[in-house]
Image (cartoon, helix red, strand yellow):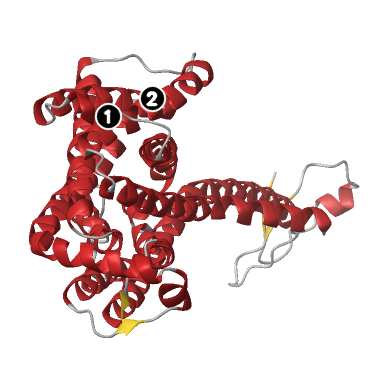
Amino acid sequence: MEGKGIIQNNSFLEKSKPYIAMICLQFGYAGMNIVTKVSLNGGMSHYVLVVYRHAFATAVIAPFALVLERGIRPRMTFPIFLQIFVLGLLGPVIDQNFYYMGLKFTSPTFSCAMSNMLPAMTFIMAFLCRMEKVDIKKLRCIAKVVGTLVTVGGAMLMTLYKGHVINFVWSSHIHPAHTTSTAAVAAAADRDWVKGSILLILATLAWAAFFILQAITMRKYTAQLSLTTLVCFLGTLQSIAVTFVMEHKPSAWTIGWDMNLLAAAYAGIITSGVAYYVQGVVMEKRGPVFVTAFSPFMMVIVAFMGSFILAEKIYVGGVLGAILIVIGLYFVLWGKYKEYKEKEAEEIIPEAIKGVHNNNFTAELGTISEDSELDDLESQRVIEPSHTLPTVVISSRMPEPPMLALEAPIKGARTIA
């Protein structure tokens, strides 16, 4: 019994790993949003931040890729190189530059709320690429569609409706002076709110396309650490080219032992290197929709961290939107869980059928042997006819006394010599 309990606990832990990994990853993304917002408010160029971020990521991941994947790294072909090149363009260059620009014009909470459209966009792209199947007759497919719509509705509610301000203890007592400065910055940023929203939508589209292409690339290039290293390295080179075009001041490249260095190192190591690898591992098992379905948690975490660290205001509309987003998230995760269980059952059924066939074959052999034994027994029995038939007497010539041999045969019988 103890061994059975240990096996069940190990099985539960194995099934829980993707969920735990994605939840921990959302905490990492939330910290990146807060640290990056502080760095951008301090005047750091987001183009330079992207370059340093992926330079740190490449430096950290490359040694592990070289050592751990030395003998299993697939051969590099030109189509695979093009896919990795586009991954570097979608993720490090387009997604992050647009996201940082939108973050600078808005706020971390608003940026995360807009990013919650990621599961919906990824689901639509995966459906168009035939990576997701939608069968309206199945409850799990309905759950995924409804969950996606509810998630987008919650994000839109957070964006369009504010309501009353929810006052926390730390908002009014811990950061009274900072609250005033944050409110002033937010009032100035309201003028670029629409521009920031458009940039965030474009960044989310690029991020969804990145997930889809990453899932496609991993089918042929299975070395995940090497893939992460190559994406970060090519993203660094592309970001350097973009920065040279957009930033003409050499002073923009200056970085010291301050928040700018922390933002670049944190974003590079946690949300580029580690995040790309973890997302790839989970995506290989559960698919891109499962990975992106956890992004709403980042918004909830950022809302509270932003209120505590940056003294951002949290409104009733934000709380209601967060509740809808979490409900939609659970709908999507329930649908993906049922789909995963169906795939497991499809993998188990052929083996079970094979075992049933073997058992049937054995049973048939046993039946045949039993039938043959019964036939042998029946052949030894005297079968009484159901109809009246002439009696047949089989006899052989035996030396008999002469007097018996002259007697007439039995009436109604034939003698066969």
Q: Residue at x 24, y 84 (%)?
A: 163
Q: Residue at x 44, y 66 (%)?
A: 308
Residue 312: image quadrant is bottom left
Query: The N terminus lies in which quarter of the figure?
Result: bottom right
Q: Amino acid at mark 1?
A: Val
- Tell me if 107 is positioned left or right of 21 in this view: left
Q: Of 335 and 194, which appears nearest the observer?
A: 194
Residue 90, numbered label: none
Distance from label 1 to label 2 (Cα)? 11 Å
Q: Which residue has dot 1 on it?
A: 51
Q: Amino acid at mark 2?
A: Thr
Q: Secondary structure at mark 2?
A: helix
Image: 144 above or below 263: below
Q: Secondary structure at mark 1?
A: helix
**Which residue lies most toward the bottom here?**
164
Q: Of 390 and 25, which appears nearest the observer?
A: 25
Residue 58, numbered label: 2
Image: 11 above or below 314: above
Residue 130: in sight, yes or no? no
Position of residue 356 measured from the top left corner of the image (x, y, whole percent): 56, 52
- Tell me if 221 is positioned left or right of 160 in this view: right
Tell me if mark 1 has few (under 14), some (14-19) or many (20+) residues whose alpha carbon lies within 10 angstroms of its own.
many
- Tell me if 131 is positioned left or right of 334 in this view: left
